[in-house]
Each structure stands twice: as structure tokens, then as C-alpha cells.
Amino acid sequence: MYRLNLIVITLWVGALWMTGLSAYVLFDTLRDKQLAGSLAGRLFTIVSYIGMASALYLLIQRLMDYGTSALKQSFFWAVLVMLLLVLAGHFGIQPLLAQLKADAMPADVMHSVFASRFKNWHGVASVAYLAECLLGFVLVLKAR
């Protein structure tokens, strides 16, 4: 099981960091920022599903291996917080951003009355994603 845990951690944390870097490259390279946002959003959705599945597996595996003493481990809490961040982002913040984009149609949300709210919520999403990425380092360092 140890090797499978390492594979799951590698997949999840690697996907987190690669998706963040890919989003940066998309926005830096493409002239059409709506297309860049659409592609980045799709990548973030995929990495959210990877995160949900990985977190559930790792939490269940940790509880099976250590019982209730898993609750005393930083690894367990890092996975749990990462899962909560994934859920908040995927089911809370992302739908809100999508609604703001839809409300702005046919204009680009950044050129609408919703631009300020969109920027604020996008900032919240970015900070949450960065926290999730940094907690990924805890998983890598605490995996055993």
C-alpha cells in the first residue's frame, strides 16, 4: 500500500503544480483571455476530481492503517484541509465565478460591472489553490 500511496500523492500534487503552471502559460501565451480562462478552468476541474478521489483514498487508507491515531498526524490533517479546499473551490468558488461570467454576457466579465467581484473571488480562489499546493509539500514530506 505504501507504493500506491506514493503514486496517489505524486499524481495529486504533481497535477496541482502542473495545472497552476499551465494556467500561467495559457494566460501569458494566448491573446484570447476568454479562451485561456476556459482552458484553465477545464484543467482546474480535472485536477479537482483528481484531488477529491486522491484525498478520499488517502484519508480512508490512513484511517485503516492507523485507526483513530491517524487523527494525531499532520499528514491526515493536511489531506483533510486540502480536500476541504478542493470542495470549497469546486463547489463554491468556481460556480460563483461561472455565474459572474454568465451574468456579464455577452461582454467579457473583466469589461463588465461584475469585474470587481470577479477579481475578488478569483483572488480568493488563487489563495486557496496556492494553500492547497503548499500543503501538497506536506504530503510529500510526511508520506510514509
Image: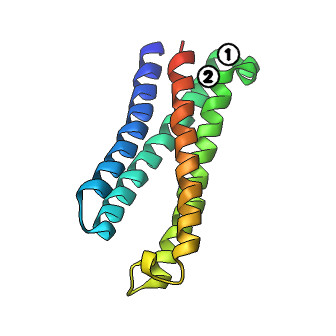
Tell me where residue 86 appears, x and y as whole percent: 55, 47
Tell me where residue 95 appears, x and y as whole percent: 53, 67
For the C terminus, the quadrant is top right
Q: Determine which quarter of the picture holds residue 64.
A: top right
Q: Determine which quarter of the picture holds residue 31.
A: bottom left
Q: Is residue 35 left or right of residue 140?
A: left
Residue drawn at point x = 43 percent, y = 28 percent: 8
Q: What residue type is disc 1 on?
A: Tyr
As drawn, the residue found furthest toward the bottom would be: 106
Q: What residue type is disc 2 on?
A: Arg
Residue drawn at point x = 42 percent, y = 46 percent: 47
Element on which disc 1 rests: helix
Residue drawn at point x = 74 percent, y = 24 percent: 71
Classify 93 as above or below 53: below
Q: Is disc 1 surrounded by few (<14), some (14 to 19) or many (20+) residues within 10 Å?
A: few
Foreground residue, 42 or 57?
42
Q: Is disc 2 surrounded by few (<14), some (14 to 19) or many (20+) residues within 10 Å?
A: some
Label 1 belongs to which residue?
Answer: 66
Element on which disc 2 rests: helix
Real-space CA distance between mark 1 and mark 2, rounded to the nearest whole angstrom: 6 Å
Tag 1 near tag 2, CB within 8 Å: yes
Foreground residue, 88 or 114?
114
Label 2 belongs to which residue?
Answer: 62
How many circles with numbers are drawn on the protein? 2
Residue drawn at point x = 65 percent, y = 38 percent: 81
Q: Is residue 32 something that shows in the picture?
A: yes
